[in-house]
Image (cartoon, rainbow, N blue to C red):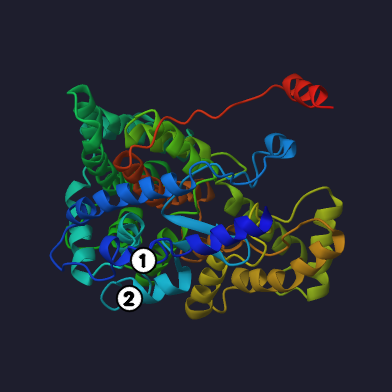
Amino acid sequence: MAASLRSIVQASRSPFARAGIASARFSSTVPKQSTLKDRLAELIPAEIEHVKQIRAQHGKKSFGPVLVDQLYGGMRGLPALIWDGSVLDAEEGIRFRGKSIPECQELLPKAPGGSEPLPEGLFWLLVTGEIPTQEQVTGLSRDWAARAAIPEFVEEILDRCPPTLHPMSQFSLAVTALNHDSAFAKAYQDGISKKDYWGPTFEDAMDLIAKLPNIAGRIYRNVFGDGKLPAIDLHKDYSHNLATLFGFGENEAFVELLRLYITIHSDHEGGNVSAHTGKLVGSALSDPFLAFGASLNGLAGPLHGLANQEVLVWLRKMQEKIGENASDVAVKEYVWSTLKGGQVVPGYGHAVLRKTDPRYVAQREFALKHLPHDPLFRLVGQVYNIVPNILLEAGKAKNPWPNVDAHSGVLLTHYGLTQMQFYTVLFGVSRAFGVAAQLIWDRALGAPLERPKSYSSAAIEKIFRDHE
């Protein structure tokens, strides 16, 4: 099974390039003036036929055995979902529509004077499989800015939340409330044809992403600031407006960090809690606001979206105990004390990856460029050189290498975004890109309601007892 799955993953790294009809369906050259919705409308008919071909040719073939341990073990490694935007390879890391993070950094359009990819370009890539032009990305920036205002009643909901209510609870509440103006919900009520579901879903997805900065900014200002929110600039990109809403818009390095952060956190295939939750809820034809509100509730869990906070707390405790410029010996002793105390080293290991997370590498390269002398960053580098060998020696991890969470909190802290409770909100803004792209395609391709089969422990025993 492992060999066959690996071949499938290898093929899916550039799914459209290997489909045989890529040039007709997902070409790298697109009309300069086409909007994202226009381009999507052109791509959908061919992709519908492509899926029909796959099912006709392979639909009755086995994808591999299912082990009882997988049912009890969180369905780890169980092939059970279609997710078009990205595929995660255990050895190589994430690829967005077949492109690695370094390739995205090189190929996606950038802001004038910037060096990091604009998230708008990444969303275009997730939806179409194509690298957009600078003009198309600028058009997407302006479209989102024009859609950015949130209803007055949603503002009132957020303003009435006590500052003690966790930012993620407020975030989920506000996103869910956007359902009030859902284009899909209205169209469904009016009897829209199933083949046209994707149109209002696209509009909701665009509105969702566009309104997240105002929601996140309002939460941040209400909980950690003075509550006053600046206006969205119709001529600035998404990340610049988001940084401005947080109060960091004048710091160009922080804006660049947000561009990188949103890009690399946007999607991580479909099996993680937030992505799968959004797809599952969307399969019931809940609109994108309801589906992504559910995603956020999953992301808020300690085992999914809080890891970067845990890393930062652990690093700070280490600094308090052994000092800012501690020796490697002192760091090793602290790591061992963590493990011997029955705790894990946060930010190390991953359910799928078996090498250093390329998202970690991208953030490390950013830090080397912008903050090489930051004490906490230097400690992160020191830990990177020490922890993997200790974890291997202790036999504590199949993958002893750092993941994305081992670095992100340190970068945000450096620029003054020190409120750790808010970090998962920023993660949520990013993850909307991947979930929204997949929801659009699920409706375009007529994806059915998810309904896997479940078994009780007694039923499993009986199945195998009867076959003995």
* Dot 1 amino acid type: Val
- Asked whether residue 50 is in view, the answer is yes
CB contact under 8 Å: marks 2 and 1: yes
Tell me the distance, in whole angstroms, between the alpha carbons under discs 2 and 1.
Answer: 9 Å
Q: In this view, does 130 lie to the left or right of 385?
A: left
* Dot 2 amino acid type: Gly
Residue at left 45%, top 49%?
A: 57
For label 1, the SS is: helix
Coordinates of residue 423 in the picture (x, y in percent): 49, 51
Instruction: Identify the residue at the far left of this view.
Output: 33
Q: Is residue 438 left or right of residue 236?
A: right
Q: In this view, does 431 lie above or below 18?
A: above
Q: In this view, does 411 lie to the left or right of 218?
A: right
Q: In this view, does 383 lie above or below 442?
A: below
Q: Which picture quadrant has residue 256?
A: bottom left
Q: Which of 82 and 106 is in front in this view?
A: 82
Q: Which picture quadrant has residue 223?
A: top left
Q: In this view, does 343 lie to the left or right of 368?
A: right
- Say whether disc 2 or disc 1 marks the residue closer to the N-terminus: 2
Residue at left 60%, top 71%?
A: 377
Per the image, the residue denoted by label 2 is: 114
Residue at left 78%, top 76%?
A: 327
Query: Which of labels 2 and 1 is toward the front?
Result: 2
Q: Tag count in the figure?
A: 2
